[in-house]
Amino acid sequence: MLSDFTFREIIDCVKIPLIALKPMFNNGVAEDFEVLYVNPEFSRIIANLKTGTTLTCAVSMLENGMHWLEMAQKAVETKELFAETYYSEKKQAWFSFELQTATDKLVVATLTDITAKVSYTEQLKLSLVTDTLTTLPNRFQFYKKFQSVVDEADQTSTKFGLISFDLDNLKQINDSKGQQAGDRLLIKAARIFKSFENKNIDVYRFGGDEFILVAKNLSLADSLYTISDAVMEALNSENVNASGGISVYPDNTSEKEDLVKFADLAMHDAKKAGKNRVLMFTPELQKEFLRRMMYKTKMPAAFDNGEFELFFQPQFDISSNELRGFEALLRWNEPELGKISPEDFIPVAEESGFIKILGAWVLKKAFTCQREWEEKFAYNGVMSVNVSPVQLMDDDFLFTLDQIARESGVEPTHVEIEVTEGVLIDDTDKAVAVLDEVKRRGFRISLDDFGTGYSSLRYLQILPLTTLKIDKSFIQSITEKNGVSENITNSIISMVTKMGLDTIAEGVEKVDQLKILQELNCKTVQGFLRGKPMSQAAIEEYLSGNINALDHIKE
Ligand code: C2E
Ligand code: CA
Ligand code: CA
């Protein structure tokens, strides 16, 4: 009878290496996995993955450890059988690794030695360590080699550096000239990077448009600049633009994940500083990194403590002076650090995934206020709510939006969803599809910060917009004598008005600016001149008829 045996006894007899993992969720993302069970056959092949440990703890001890974690995450994400073949250098064997998500709480994985089945040419084809497009070794190879690079540096008391490069305009080229042109650019860039390969420099394609150079055997970190300068010169001479970041072992950190992250941070700093340059990771960036880590840890508890608050900034019709509506703007009142700007904490929340919770709260609060104000004050304006790309692209977004709209009883046509061009970066088609759905429900959609970023006119055509917000950087230079900003703003406004869209000028602080905007037929104004962001209480005071409650720059 089956009941004479435990399932454990039965599974222990299975001659296929088998392991059961329990996903550990953080904000809906399976960040790690607890090892629930390992059968004896699995332990025979991989001795150092034991019951009770987690995958992240075991990552460094496992061959292809990072890859394991990524595959397990993909299995949870897709909820389907996830299979991948990989070559183990240690065992000199090919394995097929198959993961199946049973429930949200269980992933079962098997590992089968398929060396006998794999022919030599197939082995080459299956090779996971080489990027097929550029033939450069890929990130798995990078992680595999990393420890030996560290060991060598320790033994010889030398330094090594990572120079992380990111091509500046691959996305634009893919968008405007097609995928094949993008591939050609990647191949060209790879060839240039590869020409720097020697016994002290390794080159990897890290993913997407990212490449990493590992420069070893250094006595001075500064020599990394010599290398990066030469690389940039070679790239630029062939019309390839890239931004790069440098991190140094052991000067910056001895943690491999951090070293990669630091090079990445410096690279993003280079992008911010105007692209097509290489910057080194600095103590300031280190501070910034620590600050972000702190925000990341503090945020969930701060949210539970009610430290987040929604402010509202009024928008006015320029010609009639009538109130058009409000933009909801998030605030974090941290008891020790004081007010933290959304510009500082929102990127952190996006990175950690916490934006989903925070963003849903913002929608709920803004919709509820809108309903209450309509009832209490016979108010009939529009509520603009900022939605981050991460939030919008989340699979649950439309469901959440519907639920909140239903519960609050808000009329979708009284709400405007504000997005930036950032939503189009990863998956343009998906972003457009989601926004089409949002529009279909009756919500208004505005494109925020127009005039920064790519500001491609194509975006105006493919996005289902109702409103365009002209960025404050334009408005602030609109009164300059050379007339450049004024001319550009004029063209934007007349084109956008012809398309039937509303225009909102942001960041209007001076009467002169407002006058020019009026001449240019800009419809709406939002800025400190007419009204600063205010608390809910102050807004209610204002809506109840007290005009003096409005906080603005006094003329
Ligand atoms: P944004 O969406 O462009 O919001 C407008 C920002 O400009 C606000 O900054 C506002 O206070 C500021 N501003 C308005 N008028 C003037 C002016 O006349 N002069 C100047 N110098 N600034 C003006 P704030 O509230 O600090 O928000 C910064 C950014 O944080 C927002 O930029 C938005 O990108 C983001 N953000 C704020 N709340 C949320 C939110 O609930 N969700 C998401 N995803 N992002 C948010
Ligand atoms: Ca906005
Ligand atoms: Ca804006």
Image (cartoon, helix red, strand yellow):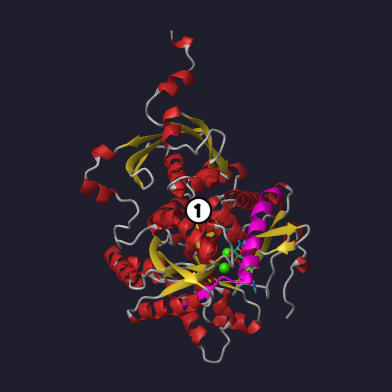
Write down the quadrant of residue 185 in the picture. Answer: bottom left
Left or right? Give the position of 239 relative to 536: left
Q: Residue at x 62, y 66 (%)?
A: 286
Residue 190 belongs to magenta span: no
> Split into 4 quadrants, where in the image is the C terminus?
bottom right
Left or right? Give the position of 69 relative to 533: left
Q: Residue at x 34, y 39 (%)?
A: 96
- Element class at badge 1: helix
The stretch of residues the image draws in magenta is 276-301
Left or right? Give the position of 182 relative to 350: left
Residue ID for mark 1: 392
Q: Nearer the viewer, residue 330 or 299?
A: 299
Image location of residue 477, percent across then percent down: 57, 83
Label 1 neighbourhood size at 10 Å, few (<14), some (14-19), many (20+)?
A: many
Q: Residue furthest top?
A: 1
- The amino acid marked with disc number 1 is Leu
